[in-house]
Amino acid sequence: MKVLVTGAAGFIGYHICQRLTAKAECEVLGIDNLNDYYDVALKRARLAQLDGRDNFRFVQCDFAEPGKLAGLWKHFKPDYVVHLGAQANVRYSVTHPEAYVQSNLVGFFNVLEAARAHPPKHTVFASSSSVYGSSADIPFAEDGDTSHPLSFYGATKKANETMAHSYAHLHGLALTGLRFFNVYGPWGRPDTAPTLFAKAIFAGETIDLFAEGKARRDFTYIDDITDGVLKVLLYPPREIPVPPFRVFNIGHHRPVETLLFVRMLEQLIGREAKLNLLLPQPADVPETCASLDRINAAVGYTPRVPLEDGLRRFVDWFKDYYQP
């Protein structure tokens, strides 16, 4: 089984590659442009964990550049594709929207075109809970309102879903979008809340908590996310009815207040956090909570790692990697 993974040096992409290459029958091609949006050393350290695996190859490539991805795709001929490469971060999209146009729109178009030229059995791509605007009901359900995302990042992910639907309809491509919620765990991105909070607590620096720490987020441990992605990947949408396209939430369904999240980190780290309680950010929604009914019915996805256990594993890795 040949699997192409974009964003292979990223947080989720690395874990997907690690799980796939643990199976001898899988041959994995990882692609990443190793950009400097955050510390490239972390990306290289993730890839170093995959060194020596005979069934893993890595190519540094920007899939948004014309012709780059198409050639690799044609040569590798993947059976399955996990497209995780993207420009992430809701707040960064406010000040750097051009990065999202290039990676999330142009880049995703290149993925769809490569799939059209050489169709795999199934392509799973990363969407986001950011497609849900403030008008969406809690818990967020896949058929809920996604017509008014609050961030440009969310708008590009909504566009990805619409683009994928059209390619599934026009070309019969099997495509599934996964709306990720807040993912955390070892090897996590340094621009996400768990790492930012942990660094601040260890350094004795002040943590800015927007919405006065009352915003609720659906935190999901990386192992649960990896399990869900691979379960979905191996069960493509049916060709009938047409188009073979679907969207799933993938989260934990147990949101917690960010203030409580910080308090749990304090206990695990053994230090008190300095807090600065601020008003909400314009691009932030007050709560995220994933309805998991659809993905559970389709592939039996059920998250198993409680926040207490996941945060303990994250803190253990954080201490080992960053040595604060």
Image (cartoon, rainbow, N blue to C red):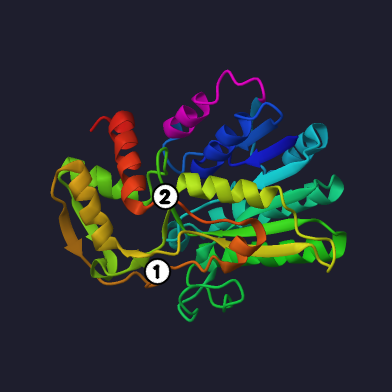
In the image, 234 versus 161, the foreground residue is 234
Image quadrant assignment for residue 92: bottom left
- In screen coordinates, is 85 left or right of 267? right
Disc 2: CA contacts within 10 A as few (<14), some (14-19) or many (>=20): some
In the image, 312 versus 244, the foreground residue is 312
Is 161 magenta? The answer is no
- Mark 1 = which residue? 284
Q: Name the residue at 22% across, 44% down.
A: 268
- Residue 252, percent across and down? 45, 59
Q: Name the residue at 13% across, 49% down.
A: 272
- In screen coordinates, is 33 left or right of 280? right
- In screen coordinates, is 240 left or right of 124? right
Q: Earlier in the sequence, mark 2 or mark 1?
A: 1
- Residue 318, percent across and down? 31, 36
Amino acid residing under circle 1? Asp
Residue 305 disc label: 2
Is 45 magenta? The answer is yes
Q: Name the residue at 58% across, 41% down.
A: 7
Compared to residue 39, the image places residue 284 above or below, namely: below
- Residue 271, percent across and down? 14, 45
Write down the region rendered in magenta: 41-55
Query: Nearer the viewer's eye, disc 2 or disc 1?
Result: 2
Amino acid residing under circle 2? Val
Image quadrant assignment for residue 80: top right
